[in-house]
């Protein structure tokens, strides 16, 4: 792991004292945008790079069945094993079956959102396994009992002061520990564990169909150690992670790096094509890729929302999203989650929350490296929700009467003015001291125009 920055926490957020999330988010967002301006200069034509990336990812998603089969065939030729998991139960069962082959109960995990999606840690703890987070940000988030605060930067919602207090339970830190000291202590604690573990579990940034490769990109080196030192390596991958060719990496590795952290290229980039071969000195003896569906096929079945599956998980949309910057992380902490969770989940409450979790301002669309039109997808989700009749009865009644009023001029002129005046006066009373609400004119524009033009 790097000893120069506290990866996933102070690389972006250098707030030293605890404060409100919006204050820390503002610092993080500003530092991200400053870094992005520098990193993005490597593209002579950033818009063309985005166009190419959007086209390549769309082609991959439109031909997903072909590329996944190609990946599986090539990966198996290199000695790897592929497991298809329809849902969370299938994925956990597959992992448990693999782990049973070893008496070693220590499992290393590098950063992967898939682990959170399937509830990996809880499932393994129930079976007596000890799961150790090797990513600095995830290690801190795990120590606090929190969910990840950002797609790329899991502990960004924690200040240095909070991190120091959290980790004092586990390690000896000075009173005013800085980022370098904290990283050094975490590295010291984890280093020996890498040599003891029997299994390493990672996610992946991309799966490459030709030649059947797993691509990991990171700044710490923990994913490389997790993938290479234990005898067994398990890769958790959503079926949408596919890229057609190795030639695509010259575009996508700089993109995910620049749009993720503002770097020209991340520090460590690994391309893994199979388990350790006879002539190789290191690497796992067994390598498994678990391809997880878990509702992704449902997202793909919707022609418009399907575009969300082209996401490369860079996290840029979060730093532009006013909801995230105001409310912080959570289940729907990104525009992507707000699009996909309602389609993947059968939980109606989750669906209702997610469809309202965006201002539809369009900022996420402007910063997305693969040009996902998030406002359009979110609106389509809302339409789908309403078409199913799942919106609240009070909402249905409101729009029923609103429609009746809007289609009759007399009601608009009379009821509209009275209702508008009542609403404005009520808001003014309830928000007293914050701002003065505008008053409603006694006559509508329609009435004034008719009087002026002598219309009856």
Image (tube, grey):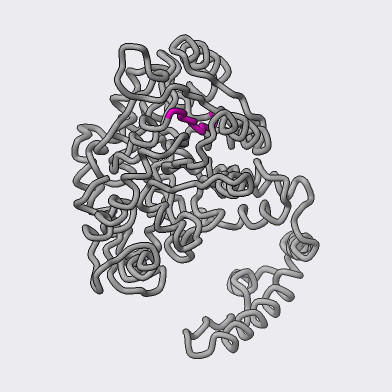
Q: Closest to the observer: 113 or 65?
A: 113
Answer above or below: position of 374 versus 101. Answer: below
- Image height of 178 relative to 243, above or below: below
Q: Nearer the viewer, residue 207 or 305?
A: 207
Name the residue at 52% across, 82% down: 437
Q: Residue 235 magenta-drawn?
A: yes
For the C terminus, the quadrant is: bottom right
Residue at left offset 55%, top offset 85%? 431
| Residue 301 in view, yes or no | no
Q: Taking 83 as reference, is 281 left or right?
A: left
Q: Residue at x 24, y 36 (%)?
A: 265
Q: Can the viewer see residue 361? A: yes
The picture quadrant where one finds residue 249 is top left
**Quadrant position of residue 43:** top left
| Viewer-side residue, 189 vs 216 | 189
Please tell me whether residue 406 is drawn above or below residue 116 in the rendered image: below
The secondary structure that dominates the magenta segment is strand
**Percent coordinates x, y for residue 36 in the rendering:** 25, 47
For the magenta stretch, what is the residue range? 231-239
Q: Residue furthest front?
A: 103
Residue at (68, 46) in percent of width and height: 383
Q: Give the percent coordinates (x, y) of residue 416.
A: 69, 73
Question: Residue 231 or 325: which is nearer the viewer?
Answer: 231
**Residue 163: x %, y % from top left:** 35, 65
- Find out whether residue 185 is within the magenta segment: no
Left or right, residue 427 beside residue 321: right
Give the image location of residue 184, x and y in percent.
24, 54
User: Could you tell me how many numbered marks the image carries?
Assistant: 0
Q: Quadrant of residue 277?
A: top left
- The quarter in which the N terminus is drawn is top left
């Amino acid at each position: 792991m790097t000893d120069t920055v506290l990866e996933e926490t102070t690389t972006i957020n250098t707030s030293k004292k605890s404060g409100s999330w919006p204050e820390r988010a503002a610092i993080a967002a500003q530092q991200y945008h400053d870094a992005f301006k520098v990193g993005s200069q490597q593209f002579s034509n950033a818009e063309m790079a985005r166009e190419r990336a959007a086209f390549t990812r769309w082609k991959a998603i439109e031909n997903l069945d072909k590329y996944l089969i190609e990946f599986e065939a090539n990966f198996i030729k290199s000695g790897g094993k592929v497991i298809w998991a329809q849902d969370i139960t299938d994925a956990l069962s597959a992992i448990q079956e693999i782990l049973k082959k070893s008496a070693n109960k220590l499992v290393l995990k590098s950063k992967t959102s898939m682990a959170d999606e399937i509830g990996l840690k809880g499932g393994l703890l129930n079976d007596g396994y000890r799961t150790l987070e090797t990513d600095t940000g995830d290690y801190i988030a795990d120590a606090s009992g929190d969910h990840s605060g950002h797609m790329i930067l899991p502990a960004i919602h924690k200040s240095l002061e909070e991190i120091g207090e959290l980790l004092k339970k586990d390690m000896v830190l000075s009173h005013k520990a800085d980022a370098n000291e904290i990283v050094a202590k975490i590295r010291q604690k984890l280093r020996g564990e890498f040599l003891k573990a029997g299994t390493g579990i990672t996610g992946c940034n991309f799966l490459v169909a030709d030649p059947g490769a797993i691509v990991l990109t990171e700044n710490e080196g923990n994913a490389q150690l997790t993938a290479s030192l234990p005898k067994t390596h398990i890769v958790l991958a959503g079926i949408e992670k596919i890229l057609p060719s190795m030639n695509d990496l010259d575009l996508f590795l700089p993109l995910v790096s620049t749009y993720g952290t503002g770097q020209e290229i991340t520090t460590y980039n690994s391309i893994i094509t199979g388990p350790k071969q006879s002539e190789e000195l290191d690497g796992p003896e067994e390598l498994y890729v678990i391809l997880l569906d878990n509702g992704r096929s449902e997202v793909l079945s919707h022609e418009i929302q399907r575009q969300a599956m082209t996401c490369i998980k860079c996290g840029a949309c979060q730093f532009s999203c006013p909801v995230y910057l105001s409310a912080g992380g959570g289940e729907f902490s990104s525009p992507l989650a707000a699009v996909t969770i309602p389609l993947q989940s059968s939980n109606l409450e989750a669906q209702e929350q997610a469809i309202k979790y965006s201002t539809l301002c369009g900022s996420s669309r402007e910063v997305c490296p693969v040009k996902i039109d998030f406002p359009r997808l979110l609106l389509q989700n809302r339409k789908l929700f309403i078409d199913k009749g799942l919106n609240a009865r009070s909402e249905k009644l409101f729009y029923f009467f609103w429609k009746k009023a809007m289609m009759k001029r007399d009601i608009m002129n009379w009821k509209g003015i009275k209702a508008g005046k009542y609403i404005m006066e009520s808001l003014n009373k309830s928000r007293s001291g914050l701002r003065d609400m505008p008053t409603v004119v006694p006559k509508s524009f329609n009435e004034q125009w008719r009087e002026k033009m002598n219309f009856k």
